[in-house]
Image: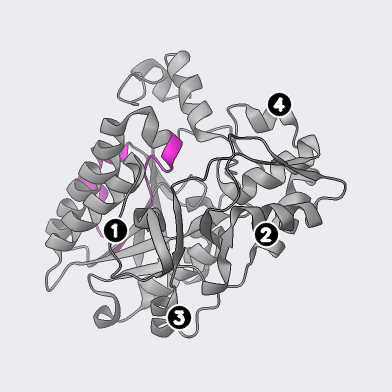
Amino acid sequence: MRVLVTGHHGYIGSVTVPALIAAGHEVVGADTRFYDGCDLYPSDPPIEERRVDVRDLGAEDLAGVDAIVHLAALSNDPLGALSPELTLSINCDASVALARAARAAGVGRFLFASSCSMYGAGGSGLAAEDAPLSPLTAYAESKVRAEEALRELADDSFSPVFMRNATAFGVSPRLRLDIVLNNLVAWALTTGEVRILSDGTPWRPLVHVQDIAQATASILAAPRELVHSQAFNVGSDRDNYQVRDLAEIVAATVEGCTIEYAGSGDPDPRSYQVDFGKLATAFPELEVRWDAAAGAAELRDAYGKAGLTLAEFQGDRFVRLNRLNALLEQRALDKELRWHESRAATA
């Protein structure tokens, strides 16, 4: 199968592409490459790739494509706060435009990287795919709207599938330090403290980036009737954690560190637990292998090997909002987050 992966050069894409190649797919990448030069380590497999903004993908980019794995997005809550309007434009409007073009071009399957964050402020139970949606941020709202619009495009020949990924963690060539477990381990290793900016009570479902990649490969290979216009929470029931539990895991993993509650002590309104039973039932052969303890150890070892410093941790190499702000300050990007022509070829 010839698969177009948007955002192939990002945190999840850099792990997903090798998994799809290993599964026998021919992969084409499309990425605006905001994060060039921000590698933790080099490991990209050689593939056909296009440097293109997702807002500019067109019919010429879809020739011969059988399926799309759509990862490209402004991909977390701080980035969404940078510009709610741009977040909606890129994450929703551009996704829908790409899906319309894909349907017209005869692309049969469209995997949309959605998010469990759309459950927002869940109740005391586990949120399954039919739970009420309660997005609390521009990022989560953009995913809700995109799912709604993409579902309307489903027909006998075009199958959108919605991967509602839990909060990702784990090592990737394009490391992210603005997601909870990756962040906590980085604080522990570079300062000796596990820093918690809430009261520690919020719930977060987590999933390793490698498990997301394997789930993507499984959904691509699934019979149409199993996945057509379906949402799947991606993760494992065992991996619903309170933030304070993650802090304890990290403290047990990074020798000599202590836990510090550095915020106001107020609870974070974003708190939800998720039911992953639908994925487990539909794909009994799919093993979600990584838990937070194994991931914390993997991150500790990778950070140590790379010699991660506090300056790098707090800089613009691995924190997405810092990276985009740096590119804006350098005038490499315009206010619409498009490359200035003079910088696009070299940035």
Foreground tag (1 vs 3): 1
Q: Residue at x 52, y 72 (%)?
A: 236
* Amino acid beneath label 2: Gly
Q: Secondary structure at mark 2?
A: helix
In the depicted view, which residue is nearer to us: 89 or 110? 89
Crowdedness near tag 3: few (<14), some (14–19) or many (≥20) residues, C-alpha within 10 Å: some
Give the answer, above or below, for where 216 lies relative to 265.
Answer: below
- Decide if residue 299 is on the left or right side of residue 241: right
- Judge whether residue 75 is colored magenta: yes
Of mark 3 and mark 2, the one earlier in the sequence is 3
Q: Say which mark, if any, is on residue 280.
A: 3
**CA separation in Å, label 4 and label 1:** 38 Å
Would you name the residue on which mark 4 appears?
A: 311
Q: Secondary structure at mark 3?
A: helix
Q: Secondary structure at mark 4?
A: helix
- Decide if residue 176 is on the left or right side of residue 3: right
**CA separation in Å, label 3 and label 4:** 41 Å
* Amino acid beneath label 3: Ala
Q: Which residues are magenta?
A: 53-78
Q: Say which mark, if any, is on residue 295.
A: 2
Query: Which percent across, then down, holds residue 115?
Result: 39, 56
Would you name the residue on which mark 1 appears?
A: 133
Query: Which percent across, then down, holds residue 282?
Result: 38, 82
Verify CB contact (< 8 Å) between mark 2 and mark 4: no
Query: Which percent across, then down, holds residue 286?
Result: 50, 79
Crowdedness near tag 2: few (<14), some (14–19) or many (≥20) residues, C-alpha within 10 Å: many
Give the answer, above or below, for where 266 lies relative to 86.
Answer: below
Of mark 2 and mark 4, the one earlier in the sequence is 2
In the depicted view, which residue is nearer to us: 210 or 232? 232
Q: Residue at x 55, y 58 (%)?
A: 209
